[in-house]
Amino acid sequence: MDRSTVPGARCRAAAALAALVAGVALCAGDLLARDFPFGSRTRGVNDLGNQYVPLHAHLWDLLHGRADGGLLVNWQSGYGSSFLPDFGTYLSSPFAPLVALFPRDRIDLAVYAITVLKIASAAAAMAWLLLRLRPGRWWAAALLGASYALCGWTLAADYNPMWLDGLIALPLLCLVGEWALAGRRLVPGVLIVALAWSANFYTAYMATLGAGLVLLVRLSLAAPPRRQALAAAGRAVLTVVLGMGLAAPLLTVVYLGTTHAYPGRLARFHPVPAENLLARLLPATYDYSSPALYVGTTALLLALALPFHRAVPGRVRAGWTALVLLVALSLQWAPTSLAWHAFAVPQGSSYRQSFVLCGLLVIAAWHALSYGPPGLPALGAAGALLTLTVAAASRTNLVHAHTWPVLLLGVAGALTGLLLLRRSGQRGRLAVLAVLVLLGAQTGESAASAAVASGLRLKHLDDYAPWGERQRLQAAAIARADGWPRYRTDPGREQTVANDPLAVGGQGAAYYSSLTSDVLTRTLTALGGGWTSGGRGVQSLDNAVTDVLFSVGARVHSPPDPHQTHRPEDTAAPTVTRRDVPPLVTVRARPDEAPFGSSPYRNQELLLGSRVYTVPRVTVRGDDGRQVAGRWVGSGNALTGPTITTSCPPGTQVNLWAPHFSGTARLTGDTDVAVFRFTNGRALAAMEPLGRAPASGRVRIDLVPDRPGRIPPGAVGCLDTARLSTAAARLRATGATSVTVSDDTVRAQLPAKSTGLAVLAAPRIAGWRCAAGDGPARPARQYHGLIAVPLDGTETSLTCTFHPPGLRLGTAVGLASLAALLLLTAATAVRRRRLPTPAPTTPPAPRERVTAAP
């Protein structure tokens, strides 16, 4: 039967049922786990709460005209960051704008609803594809479509909502391959490729590889003449190239954004043992570092039965079985794993391509079922293989006590349903009962697996509370203090999530993204800042000098987050400290362009242009009073209460810089405690203010380390706040008289006869061009990591404009691809018009009838 004879109504029915089953099962799993929004447990694990939800909140602000900045520049994070690469990486999905339909304080619910909608859409897309690959029962396509959408990869990674676009892209790109085989629908195919690559280029790349492999198998099974095969492959390649070309305005910006990003941590690929790989085929298992291959017991049994199903042609059995095995092996080999991940070892799980193998397992299962339910010999062979899989998996720590009842449920439901289906001849009441059993088993098994994955994930990953009273109070305090662009309002050092400025407002240093710029991380680190996530999660720095340098005129101080500290909630409202700071644009008449050194105190003075610190020698002693060699603290079991002793001018503000120390510190006799967090390669502790030096000038700092760490030479800086006020007043007097900021442009009016350097208090990321007065715009200079423009005394104005690197190139490629697509479409239309019209007496070709499904 020709696949074009499958009625569209059956495809639509299968897609709707698949979406319904997937959505209901996912929500049921969250209900069982008591997860948000059905219970008290947060869903905001790892980057979902720390990164993606705040980014969606910023998108909400953009769509409602409430954000500081626009599509090109995000003025709220990292003292000014390029936003288009973040948009292209995290927010360019066609589903993302749906956040605008929800209230701002329900942003967590908005992201959850989008997650459910994406998973339901993936189920619908796979169900539609299966019926186009080969005719079969519509309800069976729906069952397997839901199996794919609720695969183990989804249940393990649904806290990465942007990756779910790849889950949708795989069946859609396979459908594009079908159109290439048939030589039709070039324009829809190109648009689907463009949409997939724009939505999330990372998983779209993997989905494109998977779809290409499916197309190769389809060509090998159809075995057309070489010329036709090459033509079909050429059409597929052309479709992908044109689609990627249309997506180029985003792709080039994201690519060049990664080249300017802080490099982060280096990682190496380590394949998991074979038994761990097999264990992840079973329901209700979870492991962050192994491939999540669960597709439901019914789909797994069918895929295992395919090689033994005699009703399926031998070439079909061999082709799809070989593809599944080859892709499974490619997950375990370093070179092919690297190829799957765009030749960059991921910083995290090394099996992000697992959804492709899940899709291939489902396609194999479809070919086993669409030729008729497997008989007892095939099911027996599949059962034997499943038994061996279970036996191997039982030796791992990935199989838990709750795995067994869920597995038994799945096996019983799958075998009962398939045997009833075969006995019924796929007609009558017995067939309806079989369908209900299979759908019920699939829904229950997936819901239970989702609940188990959610609970185990919370035990393995950090988590963050959804929007609540703490964020509401923070946002209200920031809104009252906000004075942008006259000065910045920093949400504070006591962060709730790493992207606090995006979540609650303000314009701070904190910023967490895979595209955090190298210049931002290095500049703030040189000034005493801290970071997490291997340098890509820059933190706010509570320091008076850097507040002056970056025009932070208001700083919010909140009580510690009870969700992170596990302490009773502090209902105290946040407080705001204010400071007279220079404008965003200042003038340095005699800039000191000596490079930064090892001391953040001296680096701050270099950028400020004034000496404001005393940096005394320090002595580090253990609790036994002996001086610590090498200033190591918390190593072994000898030190439980080390101290730092030094001297500062009376009344100066004592700051401690200990980037490689983890624990707490406080001035002796003081109640305020500063927290330092250091993890080798992952987190660097920020400089912290501890209080005022006593009248005696003798300073003692009590340390409570929670792991081995080191106190560096020059750890203590004594800040003369009177000198700082004088320096700030001088910068205000010589700085810009007015500053206006739009999405991508900063304009400033300068005092007459300004000479030296005009410095914009924003990191000099790639893409800034500036013009002084009526002069031409040139690439901005860098002054210790900040944007700088030379002045010769004749200019009274300054204009800096940001153009994301790669946007012009991407736009040119996009326009060329659009022109090529239009030209090809026009040429095809002209060629079809010139084809001879068949005689009116020619009867239409007969179409094979399709038997209605129960």
Image: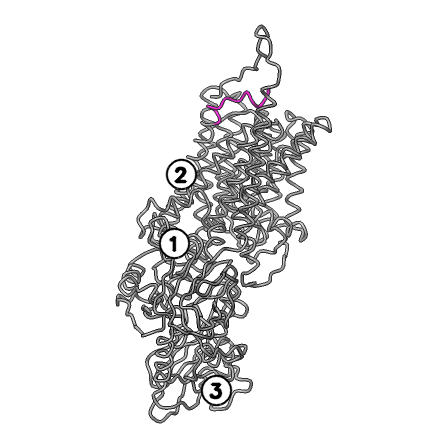
In the image, residue 308 sits, relative to residue 485, either above or below, namely above
Tell me whether circle 2 and circle 3 mark residues in contact (CB < 8 Å): no
* Magenta-colored span: 1-11
Does the magenta segment cover residue 8?
A: yes
For label 2, the crowd category at 10 Å Cα-Cα, with few meaning under 14, some 14 to 19 and many 20 or more, is: some
Q: Is residue 417 visible?
A: yes
Would you name the residue on which mark 2 appears? 24
Residue drawn 28% across and 66% down?
481
In this view, the mark in front (2 or 1):
1
Nearest to the observer: residue 743 or residue 750: 750
From the viewer's side, name the closer residue of 579 and 747: 747
Q: Residue furthest top?
A: 841
* CA distance for labels 1 and 3: 47 Å
- SS for callout 2: helix
Residue highlighted by disc 1: 58
Q: Is residue 351 above or below residue 217?
A: below
Q: CA distance from mark 2 to mark 3?
A: 59 Å
At label 1, the amino acid type is His
Of circles 1 and 3, which is in front?
1
Q: Is residue 760 left or right of residue 631?
A: left
Mark 3 lies on residue: 622
Secondary structure type for disc 3: loop
Q: Position of residue 561 (x, y in %)?
A: 35, 65
Identify the colour scheme used. one colour
Mark earlier in primary sequence (1, 3): 1
The amino acid on which the numbered mark 2 sits, given as a three-letter code, is Val
State which tag comes first along the sequence, 2 or 3: 2
Tag 1 secondary structure: helix
379 displayed left or right of 727 = right
- Counting the numbered discs, the total is 3
Residue type (three-letter) at the residue carrying disc 3: Gly
Label 2 with label 1: CB-CB less than 8 Å: no
